[in-house]
């Protein structure tokens, strides 16, 4: 449980302690928001299911301070090795790319979902909070000031009052169903058994696949950072799934035709159906849904977990700002920005599924990296005459290698890191902002194109910042707390920056930080 003096009143109640709920909790914790994170499961999720971390999600994890541990415990995707009788074909699942100063992460990281969530829980615990497992949301009602939720806990029934309720409770979301939000889409007849188990005498340097095996497709993927494999075995249409140890091992032996491998007892198993669904709404009053509660994707393309994490990251800073006094309209931009992204991910995942069904392979393109997702059409995006030809407001903020006044190397991502807006003044003095709301937590830095002794905070000596953003001398760059460009303006139009922050964050410094009564 979280370390709150009064555990019956909080700012935010999060129902669902998977990856999305954990990321939201971590973000709220660093922003001083009082919350509870609950999950009806008795113990944490134990499976490998969502095992791919895309580059944009790595950037989020870098900001949250968890990425280094994920790199240490994960690994790269191996090549695919497909078997068809005596024929063996090798292929790469990702296009080969090299990191750049603007894009330091360009290849997906393999990390079993249970490990991702384990790392997030450890960092949440270090921040003084922990999920409450075995605690189920069974009902709620809302009014103009907050939400009253009914919980079943290990110690009995409990009522909690919160300003906001967030449903990160999965594809069968209780919160979404209670709100009667339509979850339109399709459920295909495709189903598969997925299981984690140890396999000896099978090489771990490839993702082994038998696409034409009798009985259906079989895949055995070595899970980076573990001694286990993830098995995926297609079920025939209408087939009743048998999740017994004996059947799982029988499927592997029969479909692989490999009599030499040594199979151990599965340690986790499940059945998943291939569906594509999108919630009609992400918000009803003071209640929101995120992650699989708002959208479910086919596993092709490795998008579902990543899209869920980015939902939470988008919502976190907005929730915190409103809790601390910002206008409620800021929260409307969550659905406005994230729902179109999910719709695009659904379309892309279905296209990759079709390509796989048509035996066109599993190779994934740049679109899966999620680096080009944009909020250009959002209400939060400020169009201005100072916009560059390279990036527009609403685009992801690229990284850049800069130097400080002592000549030390500074990554722009490290400047952006933390729960604040960032304002960069490029080749110009930082304007004086009168009346800028204190609660905006604005970090401001001046940047010089070369070390000319002007006293700038940072030096773009190799033009990485200029080239990544298309900046010209005398421009201001405002970056949102979630790493997207809010606006680019000429320094002589600095009042536009003040107006932007005042519009969305007015009142934040005068906030009453007590939870809903």
Image (cartoon, grey):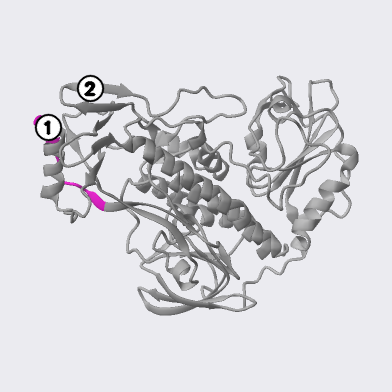
Quarter of the image for the N terminus: give it: bottom left
Q: Residue furthest front?
A: 358
Work out how far the residue at label 1 is from the one at label 2, CA to CA, in angstroms.
13 Å
Element type at marker 2?
Answer: strand
Magenta segment, which residues? Answer: 257-270
Q: Earlier in the sequence, mark 1 or mark 2?
A: 2
Instruction: Find out whether residue 160 is within the magenta segment.
Output: no
Task: Name the spot of residue 290 as percent of width and height, x first.
Answer: 51, 58
Q: Looking at the rendered structure, which numbered label has been put on residue 342?
A: none
Q: Is residue 223 left or right of residue 11?
A: left
Residue at mark 2: 88
Q: Is residue 30 above or below residue 463?
A: below
Q: Is residue 227 above or below residue 306?
A: above
Q: Quadrant of residue 93?
A: top left
User: Does residue 225 show up?
Assistant: no
Task: Name the spot of residue 232 as percent of width and height, x first.
Answer: 26, 42
Task: Name the spot of residue 361 as percent of width and height, x first.
Answer: 35, 30
Residue at mark 1: 257
Element type at marker 1?
Answer: loop
User: Does residue 305 show up?
Assistant: yes
Q: Nearer the viewer, residue 209 or 344?
A: 344
- Circle 2 packing at 10 Å, graded few (<14), some (14-19), many (20+), is few
């Amino acid at each position: 449980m979280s370390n709150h003096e009064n555990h019956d009143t909080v700012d935010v109640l999060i129902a669902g302690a998977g990856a999305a709920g954990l990321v939201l909790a971590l973000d709220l914790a660093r922003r001083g928001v009082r919350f509870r994170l609950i999950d009806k499961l008795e113990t944490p999720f134990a499976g490998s299911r969502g095992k791919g971390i895309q580059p944009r999600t790595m950037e989020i994890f870098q900001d949250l301070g968890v990425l280094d541990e994920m790199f240490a415990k994960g690994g790269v995707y191996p090549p695919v090795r497909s078997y068809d009788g005596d024929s063996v074909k090798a292929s790469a699942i990702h296009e080969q790319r090299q990191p750049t100063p603007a894009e330091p992460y360009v290849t997906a990281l393999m990390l079993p979902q249970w490990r991702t969530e384990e790392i997030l829980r450890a960092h949440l615990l270090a921040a003084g909070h922990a999920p409450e497992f075995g605690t189920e949301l069974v009902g709620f009602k809302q009014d103009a000031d907050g939400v009253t939720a009914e919980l079943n806990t290990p110690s009995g029934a409990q009522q909690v009052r919160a300003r906001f309720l967030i449903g990160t409770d999965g594809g069968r979301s209780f919160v979404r169903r209670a709100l009667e939000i339509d979850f339109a889409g399709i459920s295909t007849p495709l189903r598969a058994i997925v299981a984690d188990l140890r396999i000896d005498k099978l090489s771990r340097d490839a993702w082994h696949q038998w696409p034409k095996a009798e009985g259906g497709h079989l895949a055995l993927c070595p899970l980076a950072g573990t001694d286990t494999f993830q098995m995926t075995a297609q079920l025939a249409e209408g087939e009743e799934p048998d999740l017994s140890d004996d059947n799982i091992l029988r499927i592997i032996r029969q479909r692989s035709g490999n009599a030499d491998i040594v199979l151990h007892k599965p340690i986790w198993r499940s059945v998943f159906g291939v569906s594509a669904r999108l919630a009609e709404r992400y918000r009803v009053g003071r209640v929101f849904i995120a992650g699989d509660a708002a959208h479910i994707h086919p596993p092709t393309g490795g998008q579902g977990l990543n899209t869920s994490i980015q939902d939470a990251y988008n919502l976190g800073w907005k929730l915190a700002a409103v809790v601390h006094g910002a206008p409620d309209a800021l929260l409307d931009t969550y659905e406005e920005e994230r729902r179109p992204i999910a719709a695009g991910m659904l379309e892309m995942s279905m296209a990759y599924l079709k390509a796989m069904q048509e035996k066109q392979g599993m190779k994934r393109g740049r679109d899966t990296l999620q680096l080009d997702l944009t909020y250009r059409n959002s209400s939060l995006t400020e169009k201005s005459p100072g916009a560059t030809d390279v990036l527009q407001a609403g685009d992801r903020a690229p990284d850049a290698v800069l130097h400080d006044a002592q000549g030390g190397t500074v990554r722009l991502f490290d400047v952006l890191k933390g729960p604040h807006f960032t304002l960069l003044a490029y080749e110009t003095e930082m304007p004086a902002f009168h009346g800028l709301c204190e609660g905006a937590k604005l970090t401001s830095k001046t940047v010089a194109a070369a070390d000319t002794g002007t006293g700038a905070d940072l030096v773009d000596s190799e033009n990485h910042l200029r080239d990544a953003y298309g900046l010209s001398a005398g421009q201001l760059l405002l970056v949102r707390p979630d790493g997207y460009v809010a606006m680019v303006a000429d320094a002589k139009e600095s009042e536009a920056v003040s107006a932007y922050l005042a519009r969305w964050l007015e009142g934040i410094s005068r906030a009453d930080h007590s939870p809903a009564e």
